[in-house]
Amino acid sequence: MQSILIIEDDPNINNMVAEYLQENNYTCTQAFSGSEGALRFSMETYDLILLDLMLPGQTGEELIHTFAGKVPVIVLSAKNELDSKVELLSSGANDYICKPFDLRELLVRIQVQLRSSQSFDSGSILHYKEWTLSPDTQEMTVAGKNIDFTKHEFKILELLCKHPKKVFTKQVIYEYAWGDEYFIEDKTINVHISNIRSKLKPTGTETYIQTVWGMGFKLS
């Protein structure tokens, strides 16, 4: 499930957008000031950010420079002057939607940005410490040594390496690696994580996969 950070100080707008996106199968994190948004961004990895401009603490304009090139940013603003739009898009925003906006239009714009981001990232080489993963060839090397993984094992590693700071639940891991609905009490993820660690043990990097009790798994 893709995650979206909403940085908007108007609680009515923030809550309305979060509720709508959750109904459309997105995970939402809400921040109500620029400073809170920056803090949450430093602690978690997000697939997209919805950013208001007039924020207490750090302004939206300041935050765009922090986010640019790292995650798609859609600006939500009451400013509709052409010069403002051009300046923000030049600063690193990916899209701009004026308030008041239609939630259906916002959803479509989000989907466009996420598709574009996934298309750009799909063939990218992933690196984490001594690990190198190539999604195109489904190959992984550890300090230059090739390690063979099954398709599902590789997809699990791929997800973890794409977002090394994030804790993933078993449900999210399963749905990403299998592309199917997760069944409660299914032991599949535990078995696959155990197999991955066993294959990594000779390289001394099996401890990179950390169990977060009661939550799921992340990279150490």
Image (spheres, helix red, strand yellow):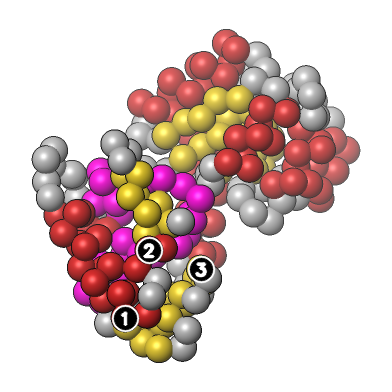
Residue farthest toward the top in the current orientation of the protein? 12
Q: Is residue 5 left or right of residue 162?
A: right
Residue farthest toward the bottom in the current orientation of the protein? 145
Which picture quadrant has residue 39?
top right
**Residue bearing the label numbered 3:** 128
Secondary structure beneath dot 2 equals helix
Residue 112 showing in the rendered view: no
Which residue is at the front of the view, 42 or 130? 130
Which label sits in the foreground, 1 or 3? 1
Which picture quadrant has residue 52?
top right
Magenta residue check for 37? no
**Residue bearing the label numbered 1:** 202
Which label sits in the foreground, 3 or 2? 2
What residue lies at 47% left-to-right and 31% top-to-bottom? 28
Residue range highlighted in magenta? 149-176
Magenta residue check for 156? yes
Given the image, on which type of amino acid does mark 1 rest?
Answer: Pro
Given the image, on which type of amino acid does mark 3 rest?
Answer: Tyr
Crowd class of label 3 (few under 14; some 14 to 19; many from 20; radius 10 Å): some
Crowd class of label 1 (few under 14; some 14 to 19; many from 20; radius 10 Å): few
Magenta portion: prevailing SS class? helix
Residue 19 percent location from the top left of the image: 43, 20
Secondary structure beneath dot 3 equals strand
Which residue is at the front of the view, 102 or 218? 218
Alpha carbon of mark 1 to alpha carbon of mark 3: how far?
Answer: 17 Å
